[in-house]
Image: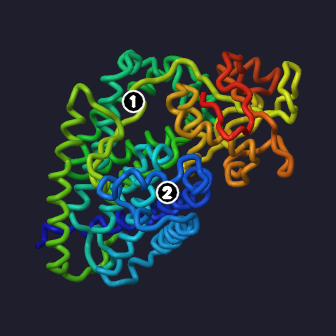
Amino acid sequence: MDWFTAPDYWLSRLVFQRALAGLYFVAFLAAALQFRALLGERGMLPVPRFVARVPFRRAPSLFHLHYSDRFFALCAGTGCAVAAALAAGLDSRLPLWGGMLLWLVPWLLYLSIVNVGQTWYGFGWESLLLEVGFLAVFLGNDEVAPPVVVLFLLRWVLFRVEFGAGLIKMRGDACWRKLTCLDHHHETQPMPGPLSWFFHHLPRPVHRVEAAANHVTQLVVPFLLFTPQPIATAAASLMIVTQLWLVLSGNFAWLNWITIVLAASALELPGDAPGLPTTPLWYEVTVLAVAALLLALSYHPVRNMISRSQIMNRSFDPLHLVNTYGAFGSVSRIRYEVVVEGTSDDVPRRDSEWREYEFKGKPGDPRRWPRLFAPYHLRLDWMMWFAALSPAYAGAWFGTMVERLLENDPATLRLLRRSPFPADSPPRFVRARLFRYQYTTWRELRATGACWERTYVREYLPPTRLTGTVQRP
């Protein structure tokens, strides 16, 4: 079937596959380095407790069959190794069926992690990586030309990512319709980057242009993905430029990067296509059957997308095969941060010396300039942003985190930039306070060197010590 393949996209497929394998590697690396404190046997939200109450059919995962911290580390390490092999092109050296099985391994492993990850893995880009990773299984290797159907499905994912995000903005916060959201967003976004301070201080007319350009890119340009070339390439290129702007302005884990990777699959890159053998019949039948399944599963995401009560970032099947996406349907006007402190005093007093814990990515010391972490995902830092919005986001895990700080738990301390207490001398009490953070002005930056100004708001968690039960915020 000549219509089944698109040989001119062989280079686009190559770029897509190698870049996706790189993102898989980052995702597994983050899981390997962070899971003990977050999900481990003594974690804030332990996997054994989760699998004991949630059946396999609702959250398919290898960890329903067995869980230990060592087994989780093995799965994450295997994911890193397979992702590195895919990035190096091992799938192209295997038979077609072997390459497909190799791509299936990281998908199965990451699905197992996401489905037991609870709050820590509740972000839209987790499902996006799984959905795109599943499609990569059927994209083929050097034995076949890229299948048109899979290329179309990749554009369908990209369309839902962008168009869904555009709709949720227009239906959500009025500031998107007034083009004023970016007056606040660069300051209040979950994890600012090293250039976010400068983006915030751009002239307000530039913020209006940013917002308007965002609407065009998310509400108009996605339809052009399904037009003939070179229009589709121009549309995908515009999306890539927009996503790179977002990469510069903040830290959104791999959300922007996987969107760029998706857009790359729609590019018709120059280069002579190599001679490829005839596509096997079994492969054609498999791809068409999977495509039919995914189109049928698209019903609920499409229904959600066109609904006035649209919701963001939801999976409609436990395998995360077809999902709905969206981000920043509302934008905070004020930035709050939870500052965690400890003291060695036996009895906390008004004049006690409280020493602050420093997180890697979230704002803390007003003089410490934000760093670029994306595409790496600092899960605890992100959830601390949500905890500052409302204690309801922190109720399940915050108390356990405080317990681990009171114990000087090594796994928990590794999630932080710095603990103010020696390893052999944990704090006697830990407390948390809520502050309002605002960017300094140009004049204040030159005078003090501080990029933030913070103001005490209220107590978030009173001084707490180890008594068997830790208070919740």
Image quadrant containing the C terminus? top right
Q: Which residue is mark 2?
A: 48
Q: Is residue 324 left or right of residue 468?
A: left
Q: Amino acid at mark 1?
A: Ala
Q: Position of residue 116 (x, y in %)?
A: 44, 54
**Residue 165 visible in the picture:** yes
Secondary structure at badge 2 equals: helix
Q: Position of residue 442 (x, y in %)?
A: 72, 20
- Which residue lies at the image location 42% right of the left edge and 47% below the top edge? 125
Q: Is residue 173 left or right of residue 231?
A: right
Residue 2 location, quadrant: bottom left
Residue depth check, mark 2 versus mark 1: number of the one nearer the observer: 2
- Which residue lies at the image location 71% right of the left edge and 17% below the top edge? 456
**First-in-chain label (2 vs 1):** 2
Q: Which residue is mark 1?
A: 213
Image quadrant containing the N terminus? bottom left
113 or 69, nearer to the observer: 69
Distance Cα–Cα, label 2 vs label 1: 46 Å
216 or 290, nearer to the observer: 290
